[in-house]
Amino acid sequence: MQLNYYFPLFLLFFLGVKGQHPLIATDTLGQMQWVEETYQNMSPEERVAQLFMVSVSSNASKTTTDKLARLIEEQKIGGVIFLKGGPVQQAKLTNAFQARSKIPLLIGTDAEWGLAMRLDSTYAFPWNMTLGAIQDDSIIEKVGFQIGKHSKRMGVHINFAPDIDVNNNTRNPIIGNRSFGESPRNVAQKGYAFMKGMEMAGILSCGKHFPGHGDTDVDSHKALPLIEADRQRLDSIELYPFKQLIKKGLSAVMVAHLDVPCLESRDGHPSSLSKSIISDLLIKELNFKGLVFTDALNMKAVSQFAEEGEVELEAFLAGSDVLLMPQNPIASKERLLKALEAGTISMKRLELSVKKILMAKYKVGLHQYVPVEEEQMIADLNGLDNDILYETCMEEALTVAKNNFGLLPIKKLENKRIAYVEFGDSSGEAFYKMLANYAKVTWVKEKDIAAYRKKLAEFNLVIIGFHKSNASPWKPYKMNDRELFWLQEIAKLRTSNTILTVFSKPYALLDIVNFNTIDAMVLGYQNSRIAQEKAAQAIFGAFGAKGRLPVSAGSPFPVGTGVDTKPLQRL
């Protein structure tokens, strides 16, 4: 084919002087030829349509999915992000949608801790906060690879992960456990390992939420959060992981809906619509050449900012390539077409974004599209290798934050009279059963503290398990007032030592007033069966704990706190 004269300039732009562009495929010449040929065969309307990624749930009604299929065929939409549902139905819909699309669709999903973030019958790996406690980054790379492998099996091309927000606000309602922690360096290291694993599996990575959503106490799904930090603070904390991953080949960045006055002079103007934040900072200053995604444009932090279509137009003019989940894709597409005709959008600017999208499609193999194999889907996504990796993660993450007198691991079992007390609103059954495999342990259940004092006087070691729901990272994580009082009263008993084991995020410790009478503290991070079993095993010395707190849990326990324990050698 005869390439037009723009093509060599286009190639040079992407290769740049600082190394290979993150969307360049191994077959560079073949990729550029396919991109150019595909682009030249598209009408202006089809080019604009490539900018949109619309959403659907695989468990939606047939009326809804049929409507989307028509939208894809008639409007030539560029991509689909799948939300809730099941894997088999999603695979069927993916194949149906791809069959209706002139140019293969870029399929995205949110699978930060695995497909189970969105889909039933799929695997949930540990949350980022848990992974942040692990000292061996190669384990996080394996998690990224496994999630990437699952995504690829589902016909997904881009996972909107890793979340590389630095969670430096304990009241953050939307990030929290989704972050690797509060240390910018640790977040960058873990984020890179996760990204590397996914990319090895053939899945595009997407760092989020630029320029950093960690220091917020407002959920951007509901309102526009304010980031009051100055530029120096942003450079050293929020922006640090993005800078590091961009240098190492991050495929895409998702821009958050945030109010960041030090980066955007217009009062209350969302970062996702800000040219100074996207074009000037992300693209020019940080030299990012990958795909720029908006966060979902139906979120209230931005959807109420302007009229239908204007939000999408402003996001594109600010520098975004992919407009994610527009409220009305047809109206938004028409608005962008009018802007193109009026010269508000230049053909050169449109070409830049569309060719990046096409590059990404080629890199993930969409130039040779193959339908998703629907058979054996559930079995392929739930193999034993997932459990093995999960066990490794929980073992490596387990953190001993305090260990007075070398109480852990427990020794001289013949002298121990051990009681287990359950706090929280979730089950500690797996924890108790594993404890009972090592020694005689009595589960003490009483209705008031007076009864607890009387019963626990019979024991010289009390293990308290604080168990909170493992269903999602957004579930409540704190002890209630009664539990906080009972903890202090039980720990004050002179007849026994106290071990507190927390199966919740470390921030649960912030409400504890006095740690002096708590002799040992173990962080299990999550309340899954495997997490409970691993904590019990570490308490009895089946393996040594070596995790480190990924966030501060009050002044006694700063970020990085952790006491190594040694496994006991048993005959």
Image (spheres, rainbow, N blue to C red):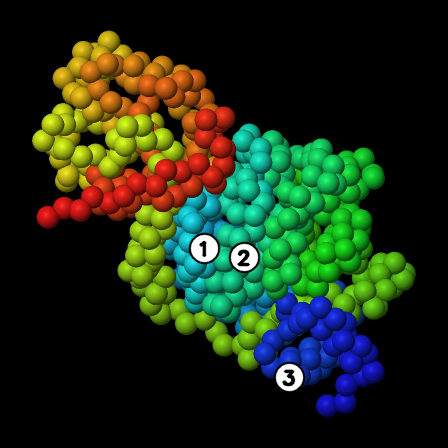
Residue bearing the label numbered 2: 192
| Helix, strand or loop under label 1 | helix
Percent of width and height locating residue 292 = 68, 58
Residue 427's place in the image compared with 56, above or below, is above
Amino acid at dot 3: Gly
Is label 3 in contact with label 2 (beta carbons under 8 Å)? Answer: no
Percent of width and height locating residue 479 = 40, 24
| Helix, strand or loop under label 3 | helix
Percent of width and height locating residue 182 = 55, 40
First in residue order: circle 1 vs circle 3? 3
Residue bearing the label numbered 1: 137
Percent of width and height locating residue 463 = 25, 28
Measured in 3D between alpha carbons, the distance from the residue under mark 1 to the one under mark 3, in whole angstroms, is 35 Å
Amino acid at dot 2: Tyr
Is label 1 in contact with label 3 (beta carbons under 8 Å)? Answer: no
Residue 136's place in the image compared with 405, above or below, is below
Frontmost of labels 3 and 2 is 2
- Closer to the camera, 328 or 344? 344
Q: Residue furthest top?
A: 450
- Residue shown at 56% from the left, 60% from the top: 205
Residue 30: mark in rendering: 3
- Closer to the camera, 394 or 258? 394
- Residue shown at 36% from the left, 31% from the top: 402
